[in-house]
Amino acid sequence: MKVAKRVGQIFVIGALAAVLVCGVGSVVSPKVAWRVRLLTLKLTGRIPEIPLLQLLEWMRPRSPVKLERLAYVPNVGASITNSFTDEESAAAGAQIFGRVCASCHGDDARGRTGPNLLAAITSLDDWQFFSTVRWGRPNTIMVPQPLSDRQIWDVGAFLRQTALDASIGKSDSATKLVGFPAVSPQMLQASGEKGDWLTYAGNWAGYRHAVEDQIDRRNVGQLRLAWAAQLPYDGSYQESSPIVDGDRMIVTEGGDGVTALDAANGTLLWQFRRPVPSGVPTCCGQPNRGVAVLGKNVYVATFDAHLLALDGATGSKVWDATVADWHQGYSMTGAPLALGDRIIVGVAGGDFGARGFIAAYSASDGRLLWKFYTVAGPGDPGRDSWGGDSWKHGGGATWVTGAYDPALHLIYWGTGNPAPDFNTSSRPGDDLYTCSVVAVDDRTGKLRWYFQFTPRDDHNWDSNEQPVLVDIPWQGQTTPALLFANRNGFLYALDRRTGRFLYGKPFAKQTWASGLTAGGRPIELPGAHPTPTGRVISPASDGATSWWSPSFDPQRNELFIPSVDSADRYFDVEEPDYREGSLFAGSGFVRAHDALTTVAVRAFDAATGEERWSSTLEVGGGEVSGEMGGLLSTAGNLIFSGHGNEFDALDADTGKVLWRVRLGGVLHAAPISYLVDGRQYVAIFSGRTLFVFGLPREQDMVATPVESTSHRSRRVKSTVHPGKRDRRRQHLT
């Protein structure tokens, strides 16, 4: 006690000394004078509401809590007021309220478990509101809130503006909170049928097809920018595929952010931020491909391998589940898949030796329901396909969203390549279940069947591509099939009930296999593997296609594939050495200098795998990136495609480019289509900006002949295979 008393005496003496020093300065400076006066009032007990250290902090220049008036009117309620009352502050306050306050006080601030703040704010002075938020209220559920001083003032500005709008009957406040329409499992099953876009690929079957036909071949030349939103992402481009529920659009911003926008005009509704720890292993930036929605929540996978549930109306966090330990090389970049009462996720990190898996979490509380490992371990069928303990760091990542058949209760998911990527010395078998598609039971996570496309891969030809579920005529009967355009250059059709191989045909240039056996296993050619001096093989390591989404038109029975013809020189010179969190590749590749790269969109008959047409978008050498964005087909007989910085609309009959716009940033995402207020929009990310296109209003529209649209014909070539178009029409009729 004596020590504490002595410390207190020293502190008071020091403060009085500071007053004397400042007193001298006050003769010279009014800015010092009011501070001396205020400190004197505090030390003489006139301002008990503010702790001394807090008072000293707020006395600093540019403090958001203004205290000068308090020095002359020592009443905190009368003197401390909010100086941030402009519209910008109120708009910022709306977003903060949504993240922090709405879960207790309601989306509209009219109360939930906490009181009605619109009613309370009119009877509170600024200091009462500020001090309550900052320090809470004893013996109540109101605890101190994790907000800065400026953020508290912004929330106060929002509440006062909202209360004022409500009192005068104003309904168009710029800071109004918009309700989030609940999404049922039935809505997810019917996604895409009514102008919404509720899943990553538009529906559970992976079609990425729009039933809207307002935008068609006659008027696509009149497409114009409806609105754009630039998002604060540090990377060079976004890979997010938007979700649209009613008039609300949800997009991700790289590895740490989610944003809600008004789908009609791009107005910001809320933003969620969760910083990613530094040091998370990454091979390719921190992309994120989108969210899932179910009930009133939005679900997002973070780059440091967490699954979050957010309140769809406000962006506030509902729960946070740790999916994997990022220190072990894990990350997450794919959009979750929402089913009846659960959220399915996959993981990235195979290139760092992380053992891949698919997992299901309870949508209500984030509990782990089941986990299926995509690399067979002890006790699993297929364990003997791995040498020694190589399964422990076998890769097989699952970073692209799968498909779902509710009638069969099966989830279909592509798996990544084995690790180390280019060296098989430590893994001499087939390396199950890498480079495969697996079908697991949605209720238990148990494996029902698998099909491996590239056994013992040493080219980085992962199978992280979009499965597409279609019904096709096969041997005289309708067969539920799964179509899979694989990075290895082959298009496969499988019976999705059993995994039985139906057909497989090359859809792009490949020089590693002469074909497939009756069971679908590749017949490898001599010279199909890397060597110490390097060997040129097609496809390139980036693949004949990749995670860039294909699209399927059910009326045409056609699958459209983003395709690349290219070649790399593959090397096998390094003995792989696993180190946690480090790249586990074992050699590598370089671009083959004498090989041309051709970027194209190609159409295929889903029933036979025969090519209908091919539209070349670019061809060249090292200047051609060999990467694309995904595709979108529509009932308006169009295919939308992103490549480089160009966004194209192709004729679905021929592949001819009918419309093109250069957006300035790299297009490395898939487009979507949706309806708001009866108007069709098409949205695509270019660089860090979301561009949304629509037709002008009816009174401004005129029919545009297809032939009059312009594009760079010297770079675009479309080839329709003779006779196949007529057979397609005959089949459809």
Image: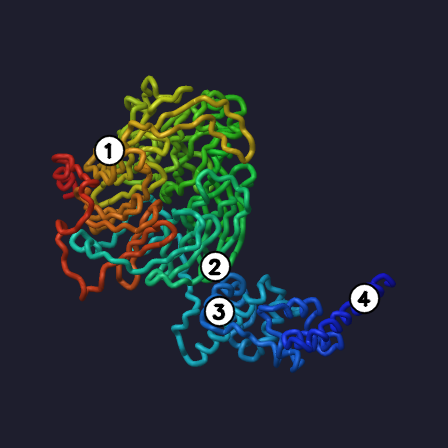
* Residue situated in front as seen by the camera: 259 or 44: 44
**Mark whose residue sits in front, 4 or 3:** 4
Q: Residue at x 36, y 34 (%)?
A: 542
Of mark 4 and mark 3, the one earlier in the sequence is: 4
**Mark whose residue sits in front, 1 or 3:** 3
Residue named by callout 3: 89
User: Which quadrant is home to the C terminus?
Assistant: top left
**Mark whose residue sits in front, 1 or 4:** 4
Q: Secondary structure at mark 2?
A: loop
* Amino acid under disc 3: Ser
**Mark whose residue sits in front, 3 or 2:** 3
Q: Horizontal and vertical percent for residue 432?
A: 44, 28
Of mark 1 and mark 4, the one earlier in the sequence is: 4
* Amino acid under disc 2: Gly
* Residue situated in front as seen by the camera: 588 or 466: 588
Q: Is residue 611 above or below residue 241?
A: above
Q: Horizontal and vertical percent for residue 261?
A: 39, 60
Q: Secondary structure at mark 3?
A: helix
Residue 692 sits in quarter: bottom left
Crowding at dot 1, Cα within 10 Å, few <14 / some 14-19 / many 20+, comes out as: many
Residue named by callout 4: 8
Q: Which mark is residue 315?
A: 2
User: Which quadrant is home to the N terminus?
Assistant: bottom right
Crowding at dot 2, Cα within 10 Å, few <14 / some 14-19 / many 20+, comes out as: many
Q: Secondary structure at mark 4?
A: helix
Task: Report whether 604 appears left or right of 265.
Answer: left
Residue named by callout 1: 609
Of mark 1 and mark 2, the one earlier in the sequence is: 2
- In the rendered structure, are the residues bearing label 3 and label 2 in contact, judged by CB atoms less than 8 Å apart? no
* Amino acid under disc 1: Gly
**Mark whose residue sits in front, 2 or 4:** 4
As measured in the structure, the alpha-carbon distance from the residue carrying label 2 to the one carrying label 4 is 46 Å
